[in-house]
Amino acid sequence: MTCRTKFHAAIHAMANSRIMEEASQRMWDLSDFLINTAGISNPLSDAIPQRQCDHEAIAAAIRDRDENLAREAMRQHILGTVAIIDGERRSESA
């Protein structure tokens, strides 16, 4: 299991609900599948440092028990991933 996979699995487990954990894991698996089948060679490879910074910000907010900051950091991480994939897709098709 990669560090990235462990991080996301830990976040899913924090739901303290088997149903929510499984639903979150399925959504993550689906998004991972969609990212990797978007027709982009090496998706997110140029964004790894930023993705790691996002993970650190999320972890810090969770450690600080700041649910609003954690939620916003997660939201920004997801939206940032979408923007990066969209930009990579546009670059490769240009």
Image (cartoon, rainbow, N blue to C red):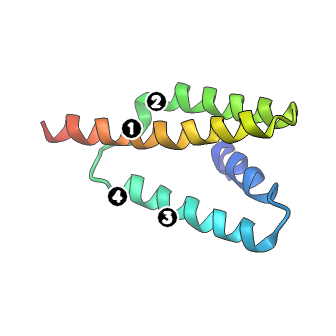
Which residue is disc 2 drawn over? Answer: 47
Which residue is disc 1 drawn over? Answer: 83
Q: Quadrant of the C terminus?
A: top left
Distance CA(mark 1)–CA(mark 3) = 17 Å
- Ranked by sequence position, the earlier of labels 1 and 4 is 4
- Give the side of residue 45 with respect to residue 64, left or right: left
**Res. 90 image quadrant:** top left
Q: Nearer the viewer, residue 16 or 30?
A: 16
Question: Amino acid under label 4?
Answer: Thr
* Image disc number at residue 30: 3
**Residue occupying the point 48% across, 58% down:** 31
Looking at the rendered structure, the secondary structure element under dot 2 is: helix
- Ranked by sequence position, the earlier of labels 1 and 3 is 3
Asked if the residue under mark 4 is in contact with the one under mark 3, i.e. CB atoms within 8 Å, the reply is no
Determine whether 35 is above or below 33 in the image.
above
Single out the mark in the foreground, 1 or 3.
1
- Give the side of residue 42 with respect to residue 63, left or right: left
Distance CA(mark 2)–CA(mark 1) = 11 Å
- Ranked by sequence position, the earlier of labels 2 and 1 is 2
Q: Residues within 10 Å of mark 2 (few under 14, many from 20)?
A: some
- Give the side of residue 53 with respect to residue 39, left or right: right
Which residue is disc 4 drawn over? Answer: 37
**Residue occupying the point 64% across, 64% down:** 25
Question: Amino acid under label 1?
Answer: Ala
Distance CA(mark 1)–CA(mark 4) = 16 Å
Residue 34, percent from left and from top: 40, 59
- Ranked by sequence position, the earlier of labels 2 and 3 is 3
Looking at the rendered structure, the secondary structure element under dot 3 is: helix
Single out the mark in the foreground, 3 or 4.
3
Question: Amino acid under label 3?
Answer: Leu
Distance CA(mark 4)–CA(mark 2) = 17 Å
